[in-house]
Amino acid sequence: MNMGRLTSASITTAWLRMLWHAGCLAAWAGLWVVCLPAHAQTLTLTRTSVAAGSSVTVSWSGIASATGTNWIGLYTPSAASQNHNGNWMYVNCTKTAGAAFASGSCAFPIPSGMAAGSYELRLHASASWTSIAKTALTITGGGGTGGTTVSVAPSSVAAGGSVTVSWNGIVSPTGTNWVGLYVPSAASQNHNGNWMYVNCTKTAGAAFASGSCAFPIPSGMAAGSYELRLHASASWTSIAKTALTITGGGGTGGTTVSVAPSSVAAGGSVTVSWNGIVSPTGTNWVGLYVPSAASQNHNGNWMYVNCTKTAGAAFASGSCAFPVPSGLASGAYELRLHASGSFTAIAKTALTVTGGGVTQPTDAQLRDAARLLIQASYGPTAAAVRDAATKGPAKWIDDQFLIAQRSHYDVLRAIELGGKPLLDIDETSLMNSLWKQAIEGPDQLRQRVAFALSQIFVVSFRDGDLASEEFAFGSYMDMLGRNAFGNFRRLLEDVTLHPAMGLYLDMMRSEKADPNSGLQPNENFPRELLQLFSIGLYQMNADGTPKLLNGVPIPTYDQDVVSGFAKAFSGWSVGTNPKTDDGFYNVPWPRMHPFWTTPMQAFPSKHDIGAKLLLNGVALTAGQTAEKDLKDALDNVFNHPNVGPFIGKQLIQRLVTSNPTPAYVARVAAKFNDNGVGVRGDMKAVIKAILLDTEARERNSALGAQFGKQREPIVRLANLVRTFKGTSPNGQYQFWYTQIIDYGLGQQYFMAPSVFNFFAPDYTPQGPLATARLVAPEFQISTDSQLLGTSNTMYALINWGYGFGNNNPVNLNYGEFIPVANDPAKLVDQLDLLMTGGMTATATRNAIIGAVSAEPAANAAERVKKAVYLFAISPDYAIQK
Amino acid sequence: MNYQELVSSRRRFLKQALGVSAVGMLPTILDMQKWAAAAPLSDYRALVCVYLYGGNDATNTVVPRSGAQQQAYAGERGPFAVAPGSLLQINPISPQATALGLHPSLAAMQTLFQQGKLAVVANVGPLLAPTTKTQYTNNSVPLPPNLFAHDEQQEQWMTSLPSGPQAQKQGWGGRIADLLNSLNGNSQVSLSVALDGATNLFQIGRNVVPFQTYPGNLPQLLGMESWQPTMASAITQILTQARTNLLDQQWNSSLKRAVDVTQVVSAALDATPALTTPFPANNWLGDQLKMAARLISASGALGLRRQIFFVGLGGFDTHGSQLSDHPRLLNLLSTALGAFYSATVELGVADRVTTFTASDFGRTLKHNGEGTDHGWGGHQFVMGGAVKGGDVYGTYPVMALDGPDDVGEGRLLPTIAIDEYAATIAKWFGVAAGDIPLVVPNIGRFARRDLGFLL
């Protein structure tokens, strides 16, 4: 079960680079090399001589296999294609990849700072440095500072605000070019501290021939005419300047506060932002008032600029989530920003509160909301519990359905387009994205369902074909997230044709039988599609219990059916390859965009056109196309009566409880079979049926001796980070290698040891559960060492900060709980709500109160840490109810 | 100091605190002095199950070397056939119809075979009764359900019983452990140890709960250190409270046992001299077997007369990339087994430790262009000083599609049942003849309770 990880380092890098540069693609499976044939691409210009600062129209034609990542760059004739100095564009005439154009034209701007001389424009192969055509160009009138420009937007600004200063065409730029703010007659020496280097800081950094910076205008600045000057490297010589008008200067007039949205329902939350506090301190604060109220009458609705009621760091500008109490009457309000530690308001902004007069959620509603968030999100926060309690579970779910999905693949792609070579990007970037969305993403329900689906439709890094393919999993998780609120039939098809699954379970390149060579279609994917992804081994009743014949379960299929599906699925391979024999067999490497986002395609000559036996005695007639066979075969699976109970029960197990009653399974399966308007496989209907069922929601049901599930380790860790607002210095959650046992969790996204996932839905550990014939899937990874290792990881996170990589641990923030730490019972009650949904047993509660009380009250943070760790290892937290 | 260092420093602290600590069930200094001197007890025996997850391609592991069998094999396997010239020749003591060789990656195992320390058991698999090709074709004897599916055949290998959704799930290793557990007296450490970092069904019994760990330093629970006694006592209170919820009970008993047993095992390992036998680097199976050797070395100190180890290696499901993956995996297997045998020699227990392989299934004789698909019967290895090695037990199958051993695409109809293989091993380990049916309940359907490969 070791990973046998293939890394880019295991291949001779120089050899690879050489192939890549030569326009060759290396393929695994025998290590043959495919070199692209020369095509008749052309690149032409409307005129071959152009002045610096103007533009030229470049046209091309004849790109074979054109994609959206073909691109054009401007070079001196001897330069390597890497040295484009920012002078490049994709074939859609922008720097964001778009549509493919085999032929077309773009206006190509020639920077004003460009020296006169001979240049060339080069057309490149998709997302590569390989030039496939070029054309010569003469640039005139370049050179000197005449081409250097600086501009500012807006050109008029209030003191205390900020402008964007942009420049272009610095000849011989260095990191010490700089920008300063002046009255027009002032010498450049008199910048009064209002200056920055071209890296937007006062510490010299990278050189930028062109660029832009946000340039702050001090709030104390007098109104009038000013100018921004761009300077030569480390000198007082200005090489370009632009005019700027400053208004409303002097005093606090430059300090602003704003709120979004400007209208909110009581019980919701708004974001309050401020700017330009002169001499900011940690005791500047924001309060909520009816417009006529004195600032003393904040009624507890206030916070410091660090977003808590405990004074912390100073922020001249910033923003906070500001909760609007649910009991607030509707009407006009205002948010006021105050001077340090005083009741003097220095800025204010209007806010409308609607739906006021709503009563505060009851404690019971808060507990149920916390339980819902434990089941359906990566963990409660105090604000999320209030929000969900106010909305109620159905409305909370409906709102979650509306939140847009964010792409993991795009995060990886942005890193690549930002200039990091494809082969230097590793799984840490994917893990950063997965954990960041899990912890910060607003679309919590989608993410939990997608995670659950990733444990049913398993693909894993622990496979030679996918070992270093983080883009594969980024695209695959996006696909699961897209289908999480869609239809199961589409999900099945997207899984079947995704190249990650194609490589993982070998459907990619599976071809029809060849009686001469002994070859037969690959059975790996069809077997697991039936056993794990859809119907299971045994016929089920509608409530998920096995159908018996003479006391014996009835198989759903036999080897002949597996062979039938293998034939039906034969003839599919790489979607981005040409439809030729070579295209069928040669899986390219490296797998460049858009390999992973392109579904597999059919290769008619490789498809078995004989008849095929499917489920329930259905047979496909001979002579059908690969596409028709695939559609019919997936319809055959999708319509099998097992799918509703088989998939429904596993989703219940991932979200709510390990041992749902058959009646609960039957209610969910019924919604799978028909969402109420005749649609089968509607995932939204299934999710609502799971989460709104009385068995999931009723506290009495949760108090039962069989209810609940082990919170799986990934969710356990994410819950802590969300509830205690963990942050790290660089904003990432570097939980990169949590699959390891001793300093990790024994679990990580897309790191299952096999297609059977980390745990099987019917796993039972020895002990009371086995005696009661109950299951507890998550206990399959709860070895002695994993139990200790995971607990120790929680200890590290809670006490010291946790994360891989240098100097970037995630630290939890206990600010919310410090104020109640002097009252151990109250502290434990607050934690009980957020960590267990109010399900903590008295014995656990007393043990934690005892340990907290033994710590001196002065060590408030230590008290909170102790309490959180004791919760974390308790059955009350580890077993969610 | 990073987290790893912190944990390890806590552990050092714990070690230094031994003897003056009041924590849990830690042994005293006196115990440890006794342990340091203890060797395995005189009637000590150990079993090591080497599980090859995914279904080892047995046909490319023990391979026909010449003649018609070789030609038939090469004809069907095509590009996936091992070239006869590269095979490592073995010369079994008993006459064989088929001249055989081992895969070229199995050099250390070839040596052990020729030294008489390793045997091949041919064409073993799950059966409900002895089954001929005709009976299979006519469906005239019951067959194990869901043949050729990974988890089902794994379960059949580990339990010796055909399963179903409502089967009692206990492994034959677990049943052996239940029968012999009294030999270990009151030892706090389980007779059964899993070393691949995972749980396995093979070791699950009615009473004996395996210690499930992995190679390397064993983590101790943070918060239990003697310098924070109120934390330690609160943890103990939480984990020992009475609960009505069954999952709560499971959590508490699992975590509490992990805390206690890991402390004891860790202390015993620290007091045991280091092994000098070199183990192969970057070899996960070797890492696990080295840990098994260390635990054997500590068995006397822990008061254990019987131990059953489970080690695992994954990746054998070679539907694709078979040409690159399979030789690499076999090399891991061979070098790890070679080192482990040497370690048992170093510890003076070579004839008291028996190692045997198991795997989901063999693979099809036909190929799919990238590799091979799920089969049924497969060949296994048995290693140790007590093994009557240098021989092949059972009959090497006929390499012919539609031949007497083929049930389709070259899936082998097993000629030895798992029950017979397990019964032979259980008998050597000390299970009384009358108790063999408690280990393998279906053994009465088969003629042989001892295949003869163990002394």
Image (cartoon, coloured by chain):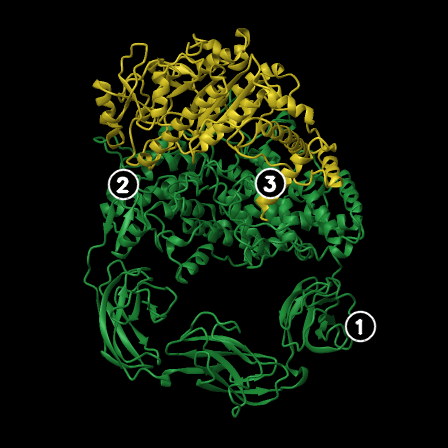
Check residue A280 in the rendering and tell me which mark sits there, or answer none.
Answer: none
Q: Chain of mark 1?
A: A
Percent x, y of residue A94: 37, 69
The amino acid type, in three-letter code, at marker 1 is Gln
Percent x, y of residue B79: 24, 32
Element marked by disc 3: helix
Tint applied to chain A in the drawing: green
Res A45 quadrant in image? bottom left
Residue position marked by numbered label 1 in the rendering: A296
In the figure, is residue A612 to the left or right of A753? left
Q: Nearer the viewer, mark 1 or mark 3?
A: 3
Percent x, y of residue A849: 78, 44
Percent x, y of residue A801: 62, 51
CA–CA distance between discs 1 and 3? 53 Å
Q: Earlier in the sequence, mark 2 or mark 1?
A: 2
Tint applied to chain B in the drawing: yellow
Element marked by disc 1: loop
Q: Determine crowd level at label 3: few under 14, some 14-19, many 20+ residues with C-alpha closer than 10 A.
A: some
Element marked by disc 2: loop
Which residue is found at the position 73% from the left and 50% from the top? A862
Q: Residue furthest bottom?
A: A185
Residue position marked by numbered label 2 in the rendering: A30
The amino acid type, in three-letter code, at marker 3 is Ser
